[in-house]
Image (cartoon, grey):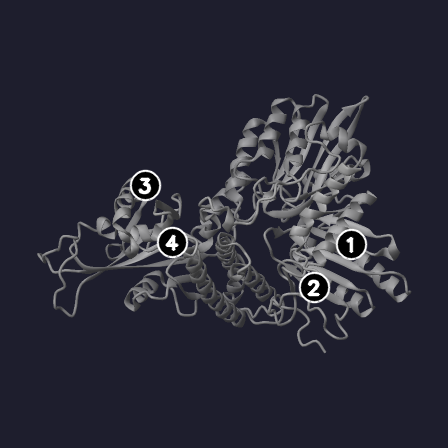
Amino acid sequence: MLEKRYINRELSWLSFNARVLQEAADETVPLIERLRFLGIFSNNLDEFFKVRYATVKRIDLAGKAGKSVLGGIKASKLLAEITKIVIEHQSESLKILDDIQTKLKDHDIYIIKEDQVTENQQEFIRNYFLSKVSPALVTMILNDLPEMPSLKDSAAYLAVKMVMNEDGTEENQHGISKILNRSVREKRYVLIEIPKNIERFVVLPEENGKQYIILLDDLIRYNLHTIFNIFSYESLSAHMIKITRDAELDLDSDLSKSFIEKISDSVKDRLKGDPVRFVYDKNIDQDTLSYLMNKMGIESTDSIIPGGRYHNRRDYMDFPGLGREDLHYEVRDPLPIQGLILQTSVLKGIAEKDYLLYTPYQSFAYVVKFLREAALDPKVKSIKITIYRLAKISHIASSLINAVKNGKKVTVQIELRARFDEVANIRYAEQMQQEGVKLIFGVPGLKVHCKTCVIEREEEGKLKRYGFISTGNFNENTSRLYTDYTLFTADAEILKEINKVFDFFETNYKVNKYNHLIVSPHYTRNAIYKLIQNEIDNAKSGKPSGIRLKLNSLSDNGVIDKLYTASKAGVKIKLIVRGICCLVPGAPGISENIEAISIIDKFLEHPRVFIFENEGNKKVYISSADFMTRNLDQRVEISCPIYDEDIKQEIIETFDISWNDNVKARYHGPGMINEYRETNGAKIRSQFALYDYYLNKIEYKATK
């Protein structure tokens, strides 16, 4: 009998982040890429505490056990378990960082501390500090303040302790006073905020073919005597701290404010959210730590994490390349879509047949080209698009503004509540609004997470629709890092139904019916149940059955139960779930026909794909929806059927390549030990094999 029917969502997420940490530890991964995985691990953890940990803490503070929504674990127990696991992960990440830095020295790359600065580097560091760093520093002497200043969420601070001299004590030539024989000294405590607008890693001049880097933190430490030269002190010590705050948005009910204003104000209020984690350098003096915790009102029951010398290791995602291609993954240029030529009209090509884009193996330029062509084409009358996360410099947004300037009617559904991208989306929303783009801010109570676009073009006196549906965001930056499918189509029935989704955004009291698309929040859950039930019925009747799913997360208990039922009926189920997987695979009598893996590698696996055997006449969908309760019941999502047989086969083949991965695939399981999946035969690293799959397609056609 299965002891626990579901794996706790938060603990499963921590297991996912441990897989990211495995990549940082993997000696087959290039060194600078390993540093960047450490950055991803740290960034993930910050967001986890802001959102998931904060949610569990709110449940606990409300005096509720929360077992019904936390997978059978009491909130207080779960908080303690999370803290224990995070401390273990943080300790492991520090060991990995030390190992990477040691190995970098073998490649003549040195990350130095303030006490390792050479004479040749001193002048550069002092000048850099005075010209770039010093003007940006915010320095707060806590003893002089009646209460603790509000510390910024996830900002890093140097906590400085100054042990003061008696008045008139003589100072040496370095500005440091002679030590006096006194048992008690006045202590002043200071916080220095590490500026976010200055590169964290300062590349120093090369010496004898060796490359040197100093962290901004240590560059500031080196110049502490310059910062505090007006004080007479005996000693200085500096250790890093940071707090993470609850990132939940609380929207103002003021009816006089626009939706943009409400979101903007709520994002600002987030900076003052309740602290949910306090991280400190484990070598900090106990009196300094006690002073800070008392001043901030942090109690021992809070999540207090002893860490290393440096925090905000998410900055390692932007570690400088140093011109060392040998320490990075090989750069392979995105490939063209076979048969769809960027140098000609993509609309003309799409009018003839559907095309599938699989980024980053193929070029995201097709999405930009589609919109730019639509913006210029005199026959295009309207463009409608959903936006969830835009790039900082977005060609998507500029194309839409260009379309308005050319007289097109442009409607943009922009999600202002896309977590941690609210500021960027607000900025673009205001810009597009000023240029005449019609903005829709979603549906009350629902996030709009679907990714789609439809245009109308006048042809022979009638309006013909073209469009695309994607599993990922229309974002030039993430398209180079996230794997995602985008279907380009002129299928009149599918595009008519996409148009219905846009109608729903504006008249959301009316629930439309769909014959092709599966749309959340009204239809996805029941549609998925029905598709799974069909496989159950086929298996019981001895007909071909099977389910293949590729998801980011699987946590909805209802869907999990349905998959358990399918497994017991004999349906073979293959799951590729990158992140959270609350389903327990391989349990006798419950899920013995279910195998589940996760792939963590160079790119972030992001597509959602559903493949149902359907007696051999396979049903294939691409989707914006994971199998999480929020995606099924609380968001607007689109799952789109694939009707083109060639594209259907392409998706099945690319799924199977991923499924056969025996290099970067790990098993999901109740122990959450992230065991690598090993199979007999040739080594298959799916992300590399997928690039070769598309390259071979092009080369095969060229030889025909």
- In the image: residue 128, left or right of residue 15: left
Badge 1 amino acid: Ile
Q: In the drawing, what numbered circle is on residue 611?
A: 1
Label whose residue precedes the other's in the sequence (2 or 4): 4
User: How many residues crowd mark 4 within 10 Å: few (<14), some (14–19), many (20+)?
Assistant: some
Q: In the drawing, what numbered circle is on residue 132?
A: 3
Label whose residue precedes the other's in the sequence (1 or 2): 2
Q: Image quarter for residue 380?
A: top right
Badge 2 amino acid: Ala
Badge 4 amino acid: Tyr
Badge 3 amino acid: Lys
Q: Is residue 534 visible?
A: yes
Label 4, label 3: how far apart the Cα atoms are: 22 Å
> Under tag 1, what secondary structure?
strand
Q: Would you place residue 499 above or below residue 297 in this image? A: above
Label 3, label 1: how far apart the Cα atoms are: 55 Å
Which label sits in the foreground, 4 or 3? 4
According to the picture, the residue beneath numbered tag 4 turns out to be: 110
* Residue 257 point in image, percent of width and height: 52, 39
Q: Would you place residue 698 above or below residue 186 in this image? A: above
